Image (cartoon, helix red, strand yellow):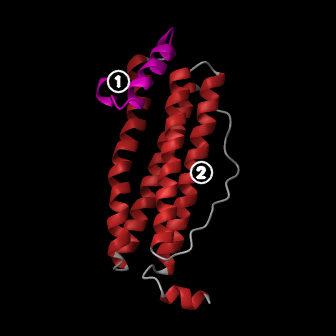
Amino acid sequence: MKDLLRQHTSLKEEIEILLNNQVKMEAEASAKYLAMASWCDRNGFKYSSAYFLSQADEERAHMLKIFNYIMTVGGTAVSPEIGGIKQDYPTFRSVFEAALQSEIAVTQSINRIVTASRNGEDYATEAFMQWFVTEQVEEEDNARRALELFDVIGEEGTGRYFIDKAIKKLGDGGGEDA
């Protein structure tokens, strides 16, 4: 039956596997951002907590977008298992360092899917993934800008308070003024 179903889709098995891996990666990113939101909340950084809650929602939306695409093109979308999400961070800055590392890993994974789609002449998947390519430019930029605040403002005295407050602007889409 699996071979018969495979004949009814243009989605190659290699691409389906990569897409399902991306579904899992987006789900893990969402869970990481929830943990970061909780850490920030516990440590008194309410704006950063709200920012990470918003990021968690966004990553879940990305996961669902890819999940639905797999089903739409006749593939088998797999609901991901998530585990081992880090719940604690040594410093406020380390939360944002982890966020940037996560976004870079997501970008690299998306680029692998685009490359595999192009090489496999799966132009529908390549076109679909272009939205994610563009989205990752913004995601990485926001993560870098948030991290740069630590260098610009500094963490001494009220620095962390002002960093937390500036994160609100990033979450509101006002990254240029943050």
Residue at the image point whose x is 68% and y is 58% from the top: 81
On the image, the x and y values in percent for residue 79 come to 63, 62
Q: Which residue is label 2 attached to?
A: 28
> Toward the viewer: 93 or 135?
135
| Quadrant of res 138 | top left
The image quadrant where one finds the C terminus is top left
Q: Is residue 38 above or below residue 32?
A: above
Please state if 94 lies on the left or on the right of 145 as rendered.
right
The amino acid type, in three-letter code, at marker 1 is Ala
| Extreme residue in the left direction | 176
Residue at the image point whose x is 56% and y is 26% from the top: 92
First in residue order: circle 2 vs circle 1: 2
Magenta region: which residues?
Answer: 156-178
In this view of the protein, can residue 32 be seen by the observer? yes
Q: Is residue 163 above or below residue 106?
A: above
Residue at the image point whose x is 39% and y is 61% from the top: 111
Within-10-Å neighbours for mark 2: few <14, some 14–19, many 20+: many
| Quadrant of res 118 | bottom left
| Extreme residue in the right direction | 84
| Extreme residue in the top direction | 157
Q: Which residue is label 1 attached to?
A: 178
Q: Is residue 94 above or below residue 178?
A: below
Helix, strand or loop status at disc 1:
loop
The amino acid type, in three-letter code, at marker 2 is Glu
